[in-house]
Structure formats: structure tokens, C-alpha cells
């Protein structure tokens, strides 16, 4: 493989990387685009969906083991960084374009692809880096690999500077922002929403969902405290599992609360203090009805049990504990935009809840959250347009 001294040294260092031969499904007929997730795959998944649905192009998505297998999208691991595996991968899939996200560089695979004339693009680019555990001295390797990309679309100006400094062609680097994630808008029955909204129109309310048993006491304590500020406040609570709804309702009633249980076809009447709902398929309904949502699982469990963008997309102000779980990146963006509030205890939660009972403050938080949830659509349009330009040129 021709290239820089650094590439030759890197290639030699990868020859010891051996593993079982990759089992690959048959290549679909027709055109195929290859997308590789060098970081979180959410933006690429939305891009892949649009390529499949709008352009009729099959998509191979690598490096995204946690991604959902959508129709028309083939999930595969990326090949090992050896010339043999790179050739086998490209011979089998024969993509017409490659788009890499984040900034992860696989020099052997990318140089092999470039030698075949495969157009290389990068989007959602944050910082160039080699694969993890590829330490070594490879002079000129980053520069020669970045030079293969005709377009590098970065998330911000600082990222663009990092790529230029590492050796990317200045003319190839542009700033666009972060690509759109899969829509977090959950459905609901509009007639039911309207009926419940009319029933609850004069009542302040908040939602805690899905709630692990370990967090029930904290949520109830915060609700009791906040009722001192708004005595008609309604807590809508969805336990972590549907079968926990009835036992939770009985427990709360035994503690003296006025409870309504949705599975028993009970409505949240004027005297109801806690409304226990049960099924995750109705979360879209409750997000729409609750001006404030607490992300269950973020206080004492392994992290938030639902994507924070779901309530954000519905205009619900977000409260969460210190444990983001798999949603750390999203909560970080929401926090930076002042679109969510973190709490560490029942006291913190009660204080934050009391603050957000002011409609103006809840609305500001919800508006900021909605902006974060809806950002990136124009960036995805830009990336998609550039992919289409390359494909039209290739085809």
C-alpha cells in the first residue's frame, strides 16, 4: 500500500490484529452508501433513514452496534485495520460513497477505499483521532488520511480549527453544526389528549416517568413539599414496569394520598393528588399534558430510563438527577442550553419543582429544551444534499 512512512508503519503494526473472519450478509442489489459511526450514531441513523426512504439507496452502517436496525439499513462491524480485511470489506459491499462521523480515522481502510476512487466525506466532525489503543509514532499519518476527504463538515468553529491544524485541506473543511437525531416525538390519541387537557385545565401538574421503586419516596416527598406552594398540584407517575402500577397505587393510598389508577379506568378527579398511569406506549400523551417532567432512573438507578429529547420535543420542562446513564451527551447539551435542571436530592427536587410551578419559568426551560430537540434539521439537509451531489456525480 503506497503512502506516507507513517501509513506504512501503521499498516505493519496492524498485521498482528487478527480475529475470526467476518460473516457478511449478501449485498443488496442497486446503489449502496456506506456510513461509519465514529461516535454516537444518532445523527447518522437519521441520515440513513432519509437516504433509504427518500432516495431508495441501501445503507451500510458500521461502528454502531447499539443502533436500531431500520428497514433498508444493514448493521455491520467495521473490518479490522489490515489490508486483507479492508479489501474483503470493500470487495463485498462495493459502496458508492463513504461518510464518516465524529472524526474517527481508520487509515488502512480509508486509504484502501481512496485508492479505489471511493469518495470520502465526514460529517458531525468533532476532532480527528485514530482508533483507540493504536498508540505509536506514525509521522504524517493524520495529515495523509485527512487529505483523502473531499468534505469535512464540522460541528463548530473549534472543531474546524482542530481538523485544519491536524492537516485537513482548508478548502475541504466547513462548519455546519450537529446533524439531526431521530425524531423523539411520540404519538398520542388527540381526542384523548383534548379530553384530559380540558379536565386538567385549571390544575398545575408534573410527570415522573418511568419511575423505579427506589425513587418513589423521593418523588412523593418532593410532591408533598411542592403542594405547599400549589395545593391543587397533580403528580402523574408512571412506574418503571406496567405491572407495578396497581401495587404502587395501593401503597400510596395506604400512605393517605388520594390516588386514581388508569388501569382501573379511573380519571384524575378534582380531589386526585396522584394519578398512576402504567403503559410506556402512552408517554406521548403524558409528555404533552405535563408542563414539567422528571426523568425516572436519573436519581438512584443506572441512569435516565428514557431519552430526554422525548419530553423536550413535546415542550415539557425537564428535571433530572445526577445519573444520566446512556443519555449523558443529550443531558449535557440540554444543560448547556439551560434547557434542563439537575437535582441531587428530594430537597433539590422540591425546590426546582416549586420554582418551575411559575408558568413563565417552566415555559422558558421548555422552549430551550424544544430548541435543542429540534436542532440539526438544516444540518442534515446540508449533509444529505452533499451526499446526493457526490452520488449523482458517481452515477
Image (spheres, rainbow, N blue to C red):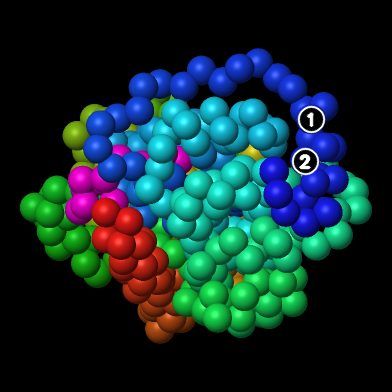
User: Residue placed at 55% from the left, 52% from the top?
Assistant: 114
Question: Which residues are the magenta region?
Answer: 50-61
> Crowding at label 1, few (<14), some or many (≥20) Cα neighbours within 10 Å?
few
Position of 275 relative to 214 (above/below): below
223 relative position to 186: left or right = right
In this rendered view, identify the residue nearer to me: 340 or 85. 85
* The label number, if any, that marks residue 15 in the structure image: 1
Element type at marker 2? helix
Please name whichever residue, 62 or 232, is drawn nearer the observer in this view of the structure.
62
Q: Is residue 273 visible?
A: no
Residue under the image location 63 percent in, 59 percent down: 103
154 lies above or below 103: below
- The mark found on residue 144 in the picture is none
Mark 2, residue position: 11
Name, please, the residue furthest toward the right: 137
Along the horizontal axis of the image, is 194 left or right of 297? Answer: left
The image quadrant that residue 328 belongs to is bottom right
SS under mark 1? loop
Residue 345 part of the magenta-drawn span? no
Alpha carbons under labels 1 and 2: distance apart: 7 Å
Is residue 379 shown to the viewer in this render?
Answer: yes
Residue at the image point whose x is 46% and y is 57% from the top: 119
Amino acid at each position: 500500500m503506497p503512502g506516507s512512512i507513517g501509513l506504512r508503519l501503521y499498516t505493519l503494526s496492524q498485521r498482528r490484529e487478527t480475529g475470526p473472519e467476518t460473516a457478511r450478509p449478501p449485498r443488496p442489489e442497486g446503489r449502496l452508501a456506506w456510513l461509519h459511526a465514529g461516535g454516537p450514531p444518532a445523527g447518522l441513523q437519521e441520515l440513513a433513514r432519509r437516504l433509504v426512504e427518500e432516495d431508495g439507496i441501501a445503507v451500510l452502517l458500521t461502528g454502531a452496534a447499539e443502533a436500531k436496525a431500520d428497514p433498508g439499513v444493514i448493521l455491520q462491524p467495521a473490518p479490522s485495520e489490515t489490508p486483507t480485511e479492508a479489501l474483503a470489506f470493500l470487495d463485498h459491499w462495493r459502496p458508492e460513497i463513504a461518510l464518516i462521523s465524529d472524526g474517527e480515522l481508520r487509515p488502512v481502510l480509508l486509504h484502501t477505499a481512496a485508492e479505489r476512487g471511493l469518495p470520502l466525506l465526514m460529517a458531525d466532525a468533532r476532532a480527528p483521532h485514530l482508533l483507540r489503543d493504536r498508540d505509536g509514532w506514525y509521522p504524517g499519518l493524520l495529515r495523509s488520511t485527512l487529505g483523502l476527504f473531499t468534505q469535512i463538515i464540522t460541528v463548530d468553529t473549534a472543531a474546524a480549527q482542530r481538523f485544519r491544524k491536524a492537516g485537513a485541506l482548508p478548502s475541504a473543511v466547513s462548519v455546519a453544526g450537529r446533524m439531526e437525531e431521530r425524531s423523539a416525538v411520540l404519538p398520542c390519541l388527540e381526542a384523548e389528549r383534548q379530553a384530559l387537557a380540558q379536565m386538567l385545565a385549571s390544575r398545575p401538574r408534573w410527570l415522573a416517568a418511568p419511575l423505579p421503586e427506589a425513587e418513589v419516596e423521593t418523588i412523593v416527598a418532593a410532591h408533598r413539599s411542592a403542594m405547599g406552594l400549589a395545593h391543587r398540584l397533580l403528580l402523574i407517575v408512571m412506574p418503571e414496569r406496567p405491572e407495578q402500577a396497581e401495587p404502587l397505587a395501593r401503597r400510596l393510598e395506604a400512605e393517605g394520598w388520594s390516588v386514581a389508577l388508569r388501569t382501573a379506568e379511573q380519571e384524575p378527579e378534582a380531589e386526585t393528588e396522584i394519578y398512576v398511569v402504567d403503559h410506556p406506549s402512552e408517554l406521548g400523551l403524558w409528555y404533552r399534558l405535563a408542563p414539567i417532567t422528571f426523568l425516572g432512573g436519573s436519581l438512584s438507578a443506572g441512569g435516565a430510563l428514557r431519552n430526554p429529547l422525548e419530553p423536550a420535543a413535546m415542550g415539557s420542562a425537564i428535571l433530572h438527577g445526577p445519573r444520566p446513564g446512556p443519555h449523558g451527551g443529550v443531558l449535557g447539551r440540554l444543560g448547556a442550553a439551560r434547557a434542563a435542571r439537575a437535582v441531587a436530592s428530594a430537597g433539590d427536587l422540591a425546590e426546582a419543582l416549586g420554582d418551575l410551578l411559575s408558568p413563565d419559568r417552566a415555559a422558558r426551560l421548555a422552549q430551550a429544551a424544544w430548541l435543542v430537540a429540534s436542532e440539526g434539521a438544516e444540518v442534515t439537509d446540508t449533509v444529505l444534499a452533499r451526499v446526493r451531489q457526490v452520488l449523482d456525480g458517481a452515477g
